[in-house]
Image (spheres, rainbow, N blue to C red):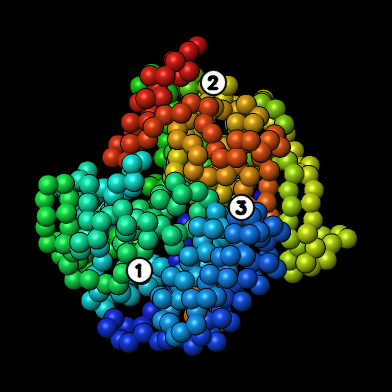
Amino acid sequence: MKIPLLLLTLGVLCSAPLHADPARFTPSQLQQDLQFVRTAIESTHPEPALRSGQQAYEKAFQTAQAKLGQPLSRDEAWRVLAAMNPVFNDAHLGVVFPDWRAETRTHLQAGGKLFPFEVMIDGQQRLRIVAGLGGATSTLAGSDIESINGMPSARILRELGALVHGDTPAFRNKLLERRFWLYYWKNYGAAEHFMLKAGAQEMDVPAAASLPAAVAGEKSFEQTFQFRMLPGGVGLLTVNQFAWPDKQRFYDFTGRAFTTLRDAGAQTLLIDVRENGGGDDDMWKTGILRYIADKPYRNGSSYVKKVLEGRAGPGEKVGDIVSGNVDSWVQPEPAHPLHFGGKVFVLVGDLTYSSAILFSNTVQDHGFARLVGAGGYAYVRQTGGTQKQHVLPNTGLEVVVPRFVLDRPSGKREPALVQPDIVLADDPFDRDALVRALLKHPAAAAN
C-alpha cells in the first residue's frame, strides 16, 4: 500500500517579487476557494470529520467564511484557510503552500531575509535555539528565546501553531519548529533584523540570507540510509524515509547490512525511524521484514476508503465509501540465509509518520520488534493515499486530502496514539543519546 511522504505535503507556490505589492483577491474569489477546499475534502476523504467531529468541522468552515469578506493577499488568505488545519488533526489533511522550497529560494534570491536560527520547541513550550539558520554553529545554541521584536515567544508559538497541520498539538509543534522561519515570515512578514531576548541577553540580530536546513536540498542516499555496528555486537540501521527512486539500491543496502549482522554474530538490532516521514510499504516489507519476520503478517486490519476516478474496483463506482478488511498476508522467510533471530528494537520519534507508522504498527502487533522512544505524537489509525492535485483556482494554494483510513493489524483502536513499549526521552541536541539509553535498559541487556 503506497503512502506518500509526509514531508512532500509541506509546501508553497512561488510568490511575487520581493517588495512588489502583493496581488489581492476579491471576496468572491476567496469564497470560491473556500468552497473548493470543502468540495475537495468531501469528494476525496471517506470520513471528513474523522478527527475533528462534525460540529468542529462545520464551525471551522463557518469561521473561515466570515473572515473572507474583504480583499486579501495570497498569504493573508492562507492564514485564514490554514486556521482550519489544527481542527482537522491530520498531517495528511490541510491547506498548504504547494512548493515552499521554491518560494523560499525565490525570496532569498530577490534579496529577502529570514529568521536567523534553526529552533526547537521543548516539552515546556519554550522556543530554543538549535543552530544558525542552515545548521551553522551558534554560540546561542540551547538558549531560550523569550521574545522576538518585543512579542513574547509564548504568543508567537500560539499564533503560528494555529496554522499548522498535524495529528496532535505535539506533532504540530515538531512541524512548526522545523519550519519556524517559514511560518514566521508568512505570518508576520519579512524583516531585516530581529530584536531578541534570549536568556539574560537582549540583542539585535540581523536576518539571515542562508538557506534553511530544510530547503538546502534533498539528502543523499548515504545521508538518508545508514548502517553501523556498535560496541557489543549491536547493529544500528537508520532509515530516514521509505522512498527512493532506485528501490533496488535500498534493497542491496539492507541486504549488506543483514549480511554484516550475520557475519558479526550480532544478537541485537536497532532500527531508527525517528526521522522517517513515510513512503512506500514495499520498501520495509522487502528491505527489512523479509529478514526479521517469523510469522505471516499484514500492515493493517480494517479500512474505509473513498472510491476515486480511476481507482474503482469490481462492483465499485466513483464516490462510493467502501469498508473492508486487509486480507493480503505476507508470508515470512525464516529459512532465508540472512534471517535475523536476535532482539529487534525500532526507535520512533516526533517525525515518524505515514508508512513509518504502519511499519511500527506491524512490528509491534506481530511481535517482530519492540518500539522505543517518545509516543503520543501521531495516530496509529492512519489516513493515507494522499491526493495532492487539489489546487485552489484563485490563490493557487493547495489542499491535500487522504482517500482512506486504515486500522492497525491488531484492529485495536486504543491507545489511539503511538505508544512505545519502552518510553525513553529523545535529546534534540544529541541524537545518539536515545541509543545509549536503550543499550543501558534491562530489555536490551537481557539475554
Quarter location, residue 416: top right
Q: Residue at x 45, y 52 (%)?
A: 172
Q: Nearer the viewer, residue 255 or 303?
A: 303
Q: Is residue 80 visible?
A: yes
Residue 8 falls left or right of residue 145: right
Residue indicated by mark 2: 342
Q: Position of residue 19 (x, y in %)?
A: 27, 83
Disc 2 residue crowd, few under 14, some 14–19, many 20+, Cα 10 Å: some
Secondary structure under the numbered disc 2 in the rendered image = loop
Cβ–Cβ under 8 Å for marks 3 and 1: no
Q: Is residue 386 visible?
A: no
Residue 305 falls left or right of residue 150: right
Q: Which mark is residue 120?
A: none
Residue flagged by tag 3: what amino acid is it? Arg
Q: Position of residue 15 (x, y in %)?
A: 38, 79
Q: Residue at x 29, y 81 (%)?
A: 18
Q: Position of residue 442 (x, y in %)?
A: 44, 15
Secondary structure under the numbered disc 1 in the rendered image = helix
Residue indicated by mark 1: 187
Q: Residue at x 61, y 52 (%)?
A: 51
**Sequence-wise first label, 3 or 1:** 3
Q: Position of residue 326 (x, y in %)?
A: 76, 44
Q: CA distance from mark 3 to mark 1?
A: 26 Å
Cβ–Cβ under 8 Å for marks 2 and 3: no
Q: Which mark is residue 51?
A: 3
Q: Residue at x 22, y 43 (%)?
A: 142
Secondary structure under the numbered disc 3 in the rendered image = loop
Classify 400 as above or below 72: above
